[in-house]
Amino acid sequence: MIFIDEARIFLKAGDGGKGCESFYRDKYMRHPIPDGGDGGKGGNVVFVASRSVQTLLDFKFRQHHKAKKGGNASSNSKKGKIGENCILRVPMGTIIKDAETGLLIRDLVEDGQLIIVAKGGEGGIGNGQKKPSKPPCKGEEKTISLELKLIADVGIVGFPNAGKSTIISNISKVRSKIASYPFTTKQPILGIVENDEDGSSFIIADLPGIIEGAHQGKGIGDRFLRHAERTRILVHAIDMAAEDQRDPLEDYEKLNHELREFSDLLSFKKRILVANKIDLPGAQENLDRFKKKFKDKIFVISALNNVGLDELVREIRDSLCLENSQEKSEE
Ligand SMILES: Nc1nc2c(ncn2[C@@H]2O[C@H](COP(=O)(O)OP(=O)(O)OP(=O)(O)O)[C@@H](O)[C@H]2O)c(=O)[nH]1
Ligand SMILES: [Mg+2]
């Protein structure tokens, strides 16, 4: 399934129903009594965040969404029916913006959180009221954009083929496609890493590879850097064996540059550095060179052979705990 993380849709809330002009009379009455009812209110277009929805795919195929009109009123002070709401379910983490102005309408984060985005029109007022009669109001019309940023605790970033999918597949239950060609991963994949000892867990996102120029839209990774903004920490994977004939030291600098250029949010995020493919020839020499040049702490692993992954998971857990306590103390 293709992962859709953006959609532009058109909303039309229901128009109000017409008020009624009518008079009650019987043979004894000199003056008939006005008894027209009021029109029903039009339905709203409502968005609800739901845990059971994963993508914005449905909105790619259906772009027009309408709520029902309010019913027309009738005589004998009968009100028109209230128009049915149109309820649209979106994944948790969907950002709703007005597509014309670009203004943020709401960021739906929690399961069950809801918001009325287009309001139904008020029904017309009939002549049965003391108030003057009024025509019904139109329901609001809006063009909005939806944007989904995945909510994961950890994001794995790195050049294509660095072994990101191999890492996630070996530390969580998710199976992300692994292959020796670049851009195997085309959409973010989420995996849950559980801790059997205390029942805690964290969510990790496998992201498509990032290449030089990603912040300017090169490759496919840039779209997904946005997802990385929402994670609390990043795991930066480097192919230390240089299987694709790039220099791992340069890879490290280039990726840092891409993250920095993309946003401050990304470049200041806590990062865990990982040297992968240490089992392959040449990897150790590259690692020695790397350590001489950069003083950053680096986890040495072979994702393929499951070497060093337990230590990596422990480090991720500790870092998340630390981030948690820092966030709490800032509140
Ligand atoms: N020898 C060795 N090969 C590895 C290791 N980790 C991954 N590979 C291989 O490297 C290739 C790329 O691995 P992936 O996990 O698909 O890499 P990726 O970073 O997800 O790649 P993209 O999704 O294309 O960005 C595959 O052929 C893996 O089998 C490792 O530790 N040692
Ligand atoms: Mg991959």
Image (cartoon, rainbow, N blue to C red):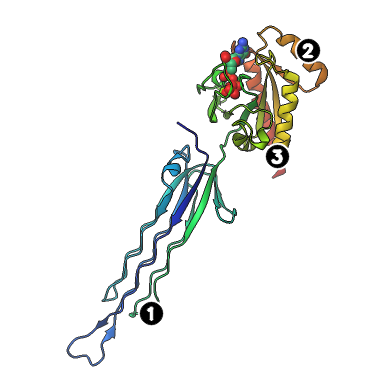
**Among numbered discs 3 and 2, the one appearing first in the sequence:** 3
Instruction: Name the residue located 79 percent from the left edge and 17 percent from the top edge.
Output: 291
Location of ligand 1 given as a quarter of the image: top right
Give 224 or 53, whichever is nearer the viewer.
Answer: 224
Whether the residue under disc 2 has CB within 8 Å of ligand 1: no
**Picture quarter containing residue 216?**
top right
* x then y, percent, for residue 42: 39, 63
Q: Farthest residue toward the top?
A: 281
* x then y, percent, for residue 144: 51, 52
> Mark 2 and 1 residues: CB-CB less than 8 Å, in contact?
no
- Marks 3 and 2, how far apart at CA: 31 Å
Amino acid type, mark 3: Ser
Q: Is residue 32 left or right of residue 283?
A: left
* x then y, percent, for residue 168: 57, 22
Disc 3 element: loop
Which residue has dot 2 on it? 288
Residue 133 - label: 1
Quarter of the picture holding the N terminus: top left
**Picture quarter containing residue 248?**
top right
**Among numbered discs 3 and 1, the one appearing first in the sequence:** 1
Amino acid type, mark 1: Ser
Q: Is residue 144 left or right of residue 160?
A: left
User: Can residue 95 be seen by looking at this rendering?
Assistant: yes
| On screen, residue 219 above or below 143 | above
Which residue has dot 3 on it? 263
Instruction: Name the residue located 41 percent from the left edge and 46 percent from the top edge.
Output: 62
- Marks 2 and 1, how far apart at CA: 84 Å
Residue 4 - label: none
**Crowding near the residue tagged with mark 2, few <14, some 14–19, many ≥20 C-alpha atoms within 10 Å:** few
Quarter of the picture holding the C terminus: top right
**Crowding near the residue tagged with mark 3, few <14, some 14–19, many ≥20 C-alpha atoms within 10 Å:** some
